[in-house]
Image (cartoon, helix red, strand yellow):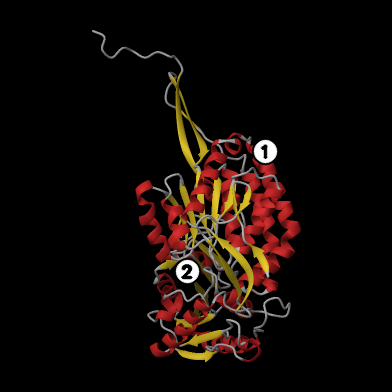
Amino acid sequence: MAHYDRLFIGGEWQAPQDGELIESIDPSTAEPWAEVALGGPADIDLAVAAARDAFAGPWRKMPAWERAGILRNLAELYRAEAPRLAEIETRDCGRAIRETRMDVGAHSQWYHWFASLADKSEGRTIPIDESVHAFTSKVPIGVVGAVTPWNAPLLTACWKVGTALAAGCTIVLKPSEFTAATSFELARIAEAAGVPRGVINVVPGRGASAGARLVRHPEVAKISFTGSGVTARRMLLDGADTLKRFTFELGGKAAHIIFADADLEAAINAATSSAWVHCGQACALGSRILVERPIYDRVVEAFRERAGQVRVGMPLDDATHMGPHAHEQQLIKTLSYVDIGRAEGAELIAGGRRIEGALARGYFVEPTVFAGVSNAMRVAREEIFGPVAALIPFDGEEEAIAIANDSDFGLTAGLWTRDVGRALRVSQRIEAGMVWVNAYRYIRWSTPYGGFKLSGWGRENGTDALEAYQETRTTIMSATGAFANPYAA
């Protein structure tokens, strides 16, 4: 059994003060594979104090080019460790190793991108008159609390840690208690890269204790959170007394639109991939597949066929396409939505069952397809976070846009068409933070990522993300030094 039984606070590996040690469960076997330390409120207080001291000390005073150099060191050490990190993440959350290798293998590029931004924060001069010189500057916001989810712990940590450090902030990283192992590995890499003590602190914990204390802490200036809307609303209440800044990347129920004139093979390849990748446990998945009616039956049949071709298996097996759910609660939730879909009148044409036999001990479920879905059904409106595709027919552009936008969410969307004019018209009317045209799930370090409506506030990645970790200071200097006596006769 692996041991991650120490928290990383102030550059020291230390036992929890008021936390606990728990067993991390391998979702492919439902057996413990690691011992993990969780922190409590006292541990969060220690971590925030360490981050505050580092912010007031060497990190804030360090030249931007030197911070950038440390981030580049981190990127290169991370790149060398990527194969090992991918295996640990697969073990912890059940994602197929073929996916984690590609995902984690690219993270070093994100860290290099953030390093390139560290010395690019620029203010501006403001013309007023000759008596004053007015200018703005960007300054780091302070101590950041980063709360990451269980489905993609390393990627979301990368987005938050890299941006915060590039901006000159310090950070307390609170990963989910379900998948904390790789965050400890990140701390170890940061330590080796020369990140000063206290700049990065790692304290996994439960939301009701460690998470709530992090959000309420008066010396935490900003919370960056990836997770559910329910938790985000609670965070807003907990952070109200201190008027915290927030960045939220929340849920999605993306519309993946396939027009009759699309390159059908490419569209089906993308749509079936995005429906079942990571066992459906990703916010950006196109789980609502909107299909123009002339090709609807062909797409339904293609989905039925593809579902049977997905190799569900042990996640560390290179041949596996789809691993298990990350934990038992999510498996139960997915199966409950299969029942909901049936009860609402959708036609279950593939999957829908927990997998038995050799995989029975793990949290495995079949790739699932519902046809004949209307956008009013819960399987079309609510984020399932499982490998459940809902196929919805439409007639023409206007109906496609109406169905796509008839959602509480607005994170991502995709559309397939050979008509360039249609691609432009439709993409500009979709209410989503990122729209792919004849592509899907193309996310890079330089492209802002975030949502409209209940899908969140703010953006990760790109230069937009950096601004969320900074404040704007305006400085006005007198050119004359004169100030008249207001009480003179």
Is residue 283 something that shows in the picture? yes
Q: For mark 1, does the 10 Å Cα neighbourhood hold few (<14), some (14 to 19), or many (20 or more) residues? A: some
Q: Please determine whether, in this image, residue 16 is positioned above or below residue 256.
A: above
N-term mark: 2 or 1: 1
Which residue is identified by label 1?
66
Q: On the picture, is 76 further left or further right than 465? A: right
Q: Are marks 2 and 1 in contact (CB under 8 Å)?
A: no
Question: Farthest right residue?
Answer: 80
Which residue is identified by label 2?
252
Question: Farthest top residue?
Answer: 489
- The kind of residue on which mark 2 rests is Gly
Secondary structure beneath disc 1? helix
Image coordinates of residue 473 in percent, x first then y, are 46, 34
Image coordinates of residue 432 in percent, x first then y, are 47, 64
Q: On the picture, is 73 further left or further right than 457? A: right
Image coordinates of residue 31 in percent, x first then y, are 62, 78
Q: Which mark is residue 187?
A: none
Residue 25: quadrant of the picture? bottom right
Q: Name the foreground residue: 32 vs 199.
A: 32
> For the point 62% across and 39% down, which residue is it?
119
Q: Name the foreground residue: 206 vs 444.
A: 206
Q: Please determine whether, in this image, residue 235 is positioned above or below residue 335.
A: above
Q: Which image quarter is the C terminus in?
A: top left
